[in-house]
Structure formats: C-alpha cells, structure tokens
Amino acid sequence: MSAPSPNLVQPLRWQGDHLQVLDQRQLPQSEIWLQCRNADDVAAAIHGMAVRGAPAIGIAAAFGLVLAARASEPLAAAAQRLNAARPTAVNLRWALARLMALGTADAAVLVAEAQAIFDEDLQQNLTMARFGADLIEAGSRVLTHCNTGALATAGHGTALGVIRTAWADGRLAGVYNTETRPWMQGARLTAWELQREGIPSRLIADAAVAELMRTERIDWLIVGADRIAANGDTANKIGTHTLAIVARAFGARVMVVAPSGTFDLETADGSAIPIEQRGAEELTAYRGQQVAPAGVAAFNPVFDITPATRVDALVSERGVIRDPDATKVRAMMA
Ligand code: MRU
C-alpha cells in the first residue's frame, strides 16, 4: 500500500505476510497496531471493531482472504467467515466476491487484487470529494455523523473527504460533527482526524442536532453509507435517519457519499438490508464502566435506514444523483 501523502492516516498496512490493523478502539488515546496473521484474526478485528467503516472492512477482508490463500485454506469457507464478521456493510461481500471471481488460490494474484481495491478506493474518494464539494455553496455550514474519514477507507474518506475538499476550497464557514453514541466514532475518530488536518470543527451530542439547527443555519448534513439499496434507500450509522429528518425540518439538505462498492442492486429497498444488532453492554456500559443499572435490557441496532426520499444528493465516484430513485440509481451503476 503506497501512501499518497506523508500525513495520511491509514487504518491498514499490508506487510507481505500479515496485515497490520490500527486498533481504532484505542484512538485517540493510543495508536496500537494489531498483527493479523490469518483470516480469523482479520475477521475478529472486523467483528470487534478494531477496523471499521464500510470500505476499510472490505479492504481488510480482501487481505484476510489473501492470508487464507497463503495458508492454503479453503477460500470459500474463509470468505464466508470473513463476510459474517459484520452483516450490514455490503463492501465486505463486494470485496470478497471480487477476489473469489478471479477463480484462483494463488496468493500473489489475490494480493494484487486486494491492493487494487485499496488503490481504487483512494482514487474514488478523491473523485467523490470533488463531486460532493462542488455541490456546497461558499460560506456553508455542514454537519457530519460517525467517522467516514481516512480511518474508514483507504484514505481521504467519503463524507469526510467531501468536507476536507470543501474546506481546502475555502467553501466552509463551519463544520460540526456528532459524537455518535455508543461507539463514539465522531468524538474519538472524526474529531481527531479533523484536528490533525487543521480543520476547525465543533463536536455536538447526538441529541443536540435540533438545537444546533434552530440556532445556526446548517446547509448540509453529509454522511457515508454501509449499503445503498437499488432504490437509493441508505443504511448508515444509527442516528443518520434521525439527523436526516431533523435536517429536512430545518431546511438543511442531505448528502450521502459512497463508492460504487457500497451499492447493492440485488437489494430492492431498505427493508431488505440486514441491520446489525449488537450487545446490550455497548449501551449499558462505556469502556468497561457500568452506566445503566446492571441487568437492564437494551435495543441496540447499530445502523438505520434513511429512505431515498429524504436524500437530496447521492454522490459516488460515477457522479451525483439528485433526489435518488431506482431509475437514477440503475442508470448511474449501469
Ligand atoms: O460501525 P461503523 O463504525 O463501522 O460504522 C461506520 C459508518 O456507519 C460509516 O458511516 C460508513 O461505514 C461509511 S464509512 C466511509
């Protein structure tokens, strides 16, 4: 993996015989690299959220399959275990299918394809960032959710890539990001990336969005996606749908930014997208510290579905769709 910029944050490093994964659970306090030496190490890193973000887990899974090939393991079984690590982000299935479609167990061939997925992701992010930034008027204020930056991708980011490029253009008068409970990807990761880039931003509690929009004009809510169905319905980090509803209520527009590997044309609409449910302890405790009464039950879906009707612009490396619907999505992905 070649870094395009010396300052680039990277979530993954291929080392020839193993994959290094930056443990995002420890950020921003510590930068600890995990050594994944086989496919199951990679699956555990994905399931355990050491690496997260749809494009990054797709890339990690591709290198996981390379490790299986190097160990002469049956690839179909390894692909199945990697794919099961997280159910919502379709990039996982997409990246594994791309390697499996080569019809070879030759690790050298598979590593070249995994590297190609990595390199393409970075290029696609730069292309999408330009498309997205061009939608943003000078003097705009934007809000983003979760972490969609370099940590979630091969670099630059999807929604955060648009914000980076728009900031470099001088278009932005303000950047806000949510803390993104319960994993705090916004507070821990997005705020860290923005700070490292020298982009001034303000953190808000997830619950502060309506008050933010009542008191400040916010022009765009800009988010990524884990899966986009054929009709443009979008699965993304829990809370995205709430933010989209509030954004619409206050006249802010909603931009979803994702590469073509996030589009799932086999899934007709959002109702068929599997939503990952995680354990109650993610809500009842924080980093091992009990918050809620012991034994309390919880409902913890970690993604939600924003209907296409609440999205103003869907941006991929292939272009921009305004007011997405099935016909427009099919045309862009053809
Ligand atoms: O649970 P996570 O942290 O993997 O969720 C990540 C998101 O929801 C992102 O918005 C999405 O994967 C797009 S990342 C470019």
Image (cartoon, grey):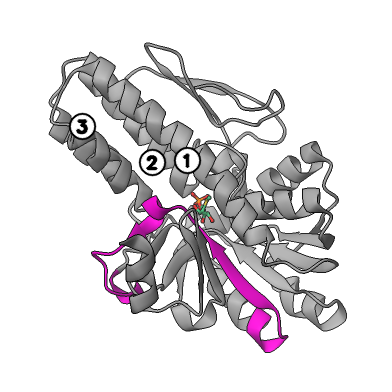
Provide the residue designation for mark 1: 121
**Distance between mark 3 and mark 1 Cα atoms:** 23 Å
Stretch of the chain drawn in magenta: 247-272
Residue 171 sits inside the magenta stretch: no
Q: Nearer the viewer, residue 130 or 18?
A: 130
Tell me the CA gap for discs 1 and 2: 10 Å
The crowding category of the residue bearing disc 2, from other C-alpha atoms within 10 Å (few below 14, some 14 to 19, many at least 20), is many
> How many neighbours does mark 1 have within 10 angstroms: few (below 14), some (14-19), or many (20 or more)?
many
Distance of mark 3 from mark 2, alpha carbons? 14 Å
Q: Is mark 1 within 8 Å of ligand 1?
A: no
Say whether residue 3 is visible.
yes
> Which mark's residue is nearer the viewer, 3 or 1?
1
Q: Name the residue carrying label 2.
A: 58
Q: Which residue occupies the foreground of this view, 72 or 294?
A: 72
Q: Can residue 44 be seen in this view?
A: no
- Relative vertical location of residue 120 with respect to residue 279 in this rendering, above or below: above
The residue shown at (45%, 78%) is 308
Q: Name the residue under label 3.
A: 78
Report if the CB atoms under discs 1 and 2 are less than 8 Å apart.
yes
